[in-house]
Amino acid sequence: MIIEVDTAGPVPPYEQIRQQVTVLIETGVLVPGTRLPPVRQLAADLGLAVGTVARSYRELEAAGLVTARVRTGTVVADRPRLTPAQSRSLLVTAADEYAALARRLGIGPQEAHDIAGTALSADGS
């Protein structure tokens, strides 16, 4: 699992982790039963406080995306397949968050659209 955090950016690190893990789960990169790195390990890897990563994991658990187990750690929860309407709703939410971030960064609509278009046309490699 590759997570990148920009500590100088406007989005808090715990939220960056939460968003990235959510995308990895929702897109099927992280399948049900996949173990997430232990909180202390991910915090050390990212150079963050343990509490920051723990908050991300708590929010993921509250959203039903992961479950914390005593012996096995934090794992991706079993989730039913999304309906087209649910998929669209998730995408609308992500687009709203993207638009809000673009506005905070002072990026205009056309530039934000171009950036999103480039990301969508990337081959993923």
Image (cartoon, grey):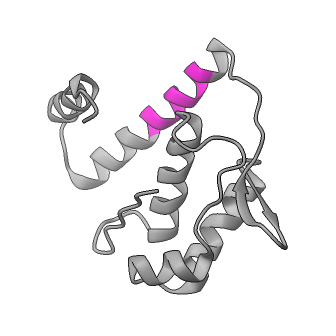
Image position of 115 with respect to 20: above or below = above
Residue 2, given in percent of the width and then of the height, sits at 40, 58
Q: What residue sits 61% from the left and 62% below the top?
A: 36
Q: What residue sits 83% from the left and 72% below the top?
A: 71
On whether residue 9 falls in the magenta region, the answer is no
Which quadrant of the view contains residue 58? bottom right
For the stretch drawn in magenta, the main secondary structure is helix
Count the marks.
0
Residues 103 and 124: in front is: 124
Left or right, residue 33 beside residue 56: right
On whether residue 94 falls in the magenta region, the answer is yes
Left or right, residue 100 beside residue 41: left
Left or right, residue 63 beside residue 4: right
Which residues are the magenta region? 87-96
**Figure quadrant of the C terminus:** top left
Residue 6, given in percent of the width and then of the height, sits at 31, 68
